[in-house]
């Protein structure tokens, strides 16, 4: 498994702060000190998240399974280009083995033995289909769904932030967690200020993203995350109250409301 950050938005922090200056008539990033830029960025973390869509990251993700990429591309706000199995000849032996199947020491366990036998059978059948005249796009139907692949993926920072809350969670399959941790590390290597935006839900919000799972299976779940009673009480109060709104006024590049 390898994740490479191949492209990213340059001067991204100034770009983000500049989008806020556009809304609030504050100083431009070029007029601010470094401390002021970070102060305004911290302010942005608690306001409208649309500016984070201005910052893009492109990743080359290799040595992963198609089962993983099937999950990855469900993020519809990403853009993707994936290695084809329709027009390229494949090899069933190039399939990502779940880590729990791996041998302990030098001894091959039962799970790994069954795995290798199944791959050998699949590869033999795949080659036999091709020899018998089957098209590549048809013969691939016999290949394992966990076959190895590579994919290029582009996400903006807002999308990555949303993904982090769920895909860093223990409920996510291990391969996806591993890939996303590598993606996160690659982003923070060039934009360390993005750390608050790339946190698992319980760290980012103090709430469990999947409480039914968390209460039973997650070692990071805490009883204070269960706000069911408080939310129900607030729901009744909110919908019984008249519509209200605040009156924001921009001053010094920030809203006072």
Image (tube, rainbow, N blue to C red):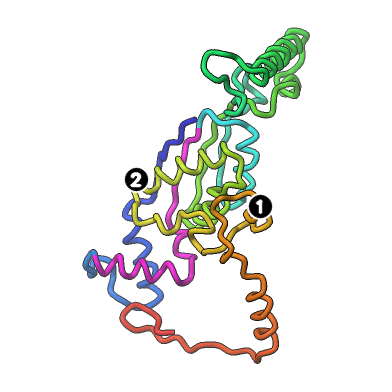
Badge 2 density bin: few <14, some 14–19, many ≥20, Cα 10 Å: few
Observer-nearest residue: 2 or 32? Answer: 2
Residue drawn where x is 47% and y is 55% of the image: 199
Q: Which quarter shows the C terminus?
A: bottom left
The quadrant where residue 64 appears: top right
Q: Position of residue 8 (x, y in %)?
A: 39, 47
Asked if residue 206 is positioned above or below residue 159 in the image, the reply reads: below
Q: Which residues are magenta?
A: 35-61
Residue 193 lies in the magenta-colored region: no
Q: Residue 237 got which mark?
A: none
Q: Secondary structure at mark 1?
A: helix
Q: Which mark is residue 216?
A: 1
- Asked if residue 66 lies left or right of residue 205, the reply is right
Report the Cα–Cα distance between label 1 and label 2.
35 Å
> Does dot 2 land on a helix, a strand or a loop?
helix
Instruction: Name the residue carrying label 2.
Output: 189
């Amino acid at each position: 498994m390898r994740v490479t950050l191949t492209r990213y938005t340059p001067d991204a922090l100034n770009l983000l702060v500049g989008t806020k200056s556009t809304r609030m008539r504050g100083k431009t990033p070029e007029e601010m000190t470094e401390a002021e830029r970070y102060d305004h960025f911290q302010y942005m973390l608690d306001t409208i998240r649309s500016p984070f869509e201005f910052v893009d990251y492109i990743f080359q993700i290799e040595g992963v399974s198609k089962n993983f990429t099937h999950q990855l591309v469900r993020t519809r706000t990403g853009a993707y280009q994936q290695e084809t199995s329709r027009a390229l000849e494949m090899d069933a032996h190039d399939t990502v083995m779940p880590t729990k199947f791996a041998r302990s020491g030098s001894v091959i366990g039962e799970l790994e033995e069954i795995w290798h036998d199944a791959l050998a059978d699949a590869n033999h059948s795949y080659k036999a289909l091709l020899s018998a005249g089957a098209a590549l796009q048809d013969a691939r139907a016999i290949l394992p769904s966990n076959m190895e692949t590579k994919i290029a993926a582009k996400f903006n920072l807002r999308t990555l932030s949303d993904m982090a809350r769920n895909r860093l969670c223990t409920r996510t399959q291990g391969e996806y967690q591993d890939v996303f941790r590598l993606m996160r590390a690659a982003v923070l290597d060039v934009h360390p200020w993005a750390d608050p935006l790339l946190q698992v839900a319980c760290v980012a919000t103090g709430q469990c993203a999947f409480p039914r799972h968390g209460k039973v299976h997650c070692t990071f779940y805490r009883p204070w995350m269960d706000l069911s009673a408080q939310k129900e009480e607030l729901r009744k109060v909110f919908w019984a109250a008249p519509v209200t709104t605040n009156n924001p006024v921009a001053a010094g590049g920030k809203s006072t409301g």
